[in-house]
Amino acid sequence: MDDAAPLFTFTGVSVPGIDGRWRLSDVHGTIPAAGVTVLVGRSGSGKSTLLRCCNRLDAPAAGVVEFRGHDLATVDVLAHRRRVAMVFQRPTPFPGTGWENLTTAEPDLDHAEGRDLLTRVGLAPDFLDRNATELSGGEAQRLCLARSLAARPEVVLLDEVTSSVDPAARRSIEALARSLADEGIAVVWVTHDLGQARRLADTLLVMVDGHLAEPGEAEAFIAEDADDQ
Amino acid sequence: MTSDIGWTGLAASLVLVGVAAALSFWRRLDLERSIAWASARALVQLLLVGLALEFVLGRTLAWSWAWVAAMVLFGADTVRRRAPEVPRLYGVALAAFAAAAVVSLLVLFGLRVFPLEPKTLIPLAGMMIGNSMTATVVVARRVVEELRDKRDEVEARLALGIAGPEAARPYVRAALRTAMIPQIETTKAVGLVFLPGAMTGLILAGTSPLAAVKVQVAVMYLVLGATATTTAVVALGVQRRLLTADHRLTVPPRPRS
């Protein structure tokens, strides 16, 4: 695969919801192989579902999601998830210490690598020994980011990761996303905050009513959102 | 040996139902009809079972095995009805009771704890299924609840590339402990708090208390082993129902109350 090929390609992707409505409806589009791609849209527009399809936590009822040209329905899912990490809106620290959280993701980690990962996300090395379930929201979310980086992924999917953290943590997580992209680790960032989207995006994709918006539709969404501010 | 109280004895015991009904009438509990219905129903059900047992116990062992199979089928159906929110539970419960029956009966009869004959096989299988039923229902519901309540954590583990069964393990373990602990507590408290049924029955039928105790202890161990077996099989089975082959969690939404 050459580097110019898209990271993710969506062809007619549909995912049903539990109430008979479609969470994703006939999604077509691509996510480029490098930089920070921001998926922006209102809540319920399907952006988190599309991100979950990239990690195969959700499987489409119709259509194909491809990662670097390979249909995700046919790849080794566990190996795929180690290449394509994902962090969620709500921090999900596992019971145990910071170190135990990191080694759950990467059992072969050594302490120096663990400390480096923590430094990377703006946490002091002593967080290795801290109880993960007693951390603040921002600290826990940064630990989750460190955990997702432990397996050295090629891509990081971030689902509204700053929505439940304080402004300092938000800034440091945004800076981390930028530096990951600069190092060649592609970032797909989901948010409903258009200001944040503009700050971060190398590529901006808009989701409306369960599909990726066409250029005209996207401009209308952005203009409408600006009016709301 | 005064093991048969006779029909007059049975009729005399009805006085106690009268006491219950009279208390209900006195305190205006409005339960007289329910008490009468429950008492009549118990009498008819048990008489029918007694007649059926009289018939089966007088025949070859094959009839008894058929009875055990019917109990396993009926037990699995009861579990399914008592945990309707657990998807496709019948097959899992059936496998669990069948596994418990094989393991426990193999031990009890293989090691010659009891002689293999109709009058030992049917009561022991009945004890095994009846007493492990509650724990089986509890574990099925708890596995679903744990995986639903901790969905974020389970999916965070899956997203790290951890396989489904391993990602679910801490939560399935919690469900198994919740289901097993009451049976362990019961086993601990036996004799101190209550005299268990099998022992009471044997003593009433004229067996010496020590001999009755030995049978009762064997039965308690049978129930403990059977509970562990059924809950383990059901926990694993339900877990498999909720995780797809490609390591996704598909837990049903909470039923609306």
Image (cartoon, helix red, strand yellow):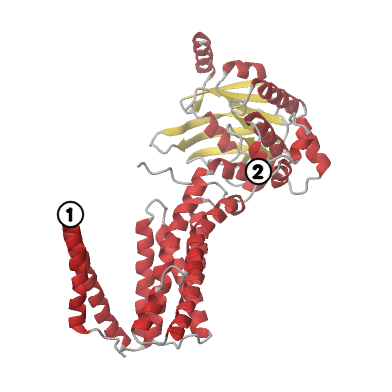
Q: Tag 2's secondary structure?
A: loop
Q: Provide residue A35's location: percent of width, then percent of height.
A: 70, 25
Asked if residue B30 shows in the view, the reply is yes
Q: Which residue is mark 2?
A: B160
Q: Closest to the observer: A126 or B248?
A: A126
Q: How many marks?
A: 2
Q: Provide residue A118's location: percent of width, then percent of height.
A: 76, 34
Q: CA distance from mark 1 to mark 2?
A: 59 Å
Instruction: Output the chain of dot 2.
Output: B
Q: Amino acid at mark 2?
A: Leu
Q: Quadrant of residue A189?
A: top right
Q: Residue at x 21, y 84 (%)?
A: B6
Q: Which residue is mark 1?
A: B30
Q: Quadrant of residue B54?
A: bottom left
Mark 1: give few (<14), some (14-19) or many (20+) Cα within 10 Å. Answer: few
Q: Amino acid at mark 1?
A: Asp
Q: Tag 1's secondary structure?
A: loop
- Both marks 1 and 2 on one chain: yes
The image shows residue B88, relative to residue A38, as above or below, that is below
Q: Provide residue B23's location: percent of width, then percent of height.
A: 20, 60
The circle drawn on residue B243 is none
Which residue reaches farthest top? Answer: A227
The image shows residue A124, relative to residue B191, as above or below, that is above
Answer with left or right where residue A183 lies relative to residue B109.
right
User: Which of pointers 1 and 2 indicates the residue nearer the eye?
Assistant: 1
- Quick one: label 1 or label 2, which is nearer the N terminus? 1
Instruction: Output the chain of dot 1.
Output: B
Q: Residue at x 40, y 84 (%)?
A: B120
Tell me the quadrant of the picture where the N terminus of chain A can be found: top right
Answer with left or right where residue B35 lies relative to residue A113.
left
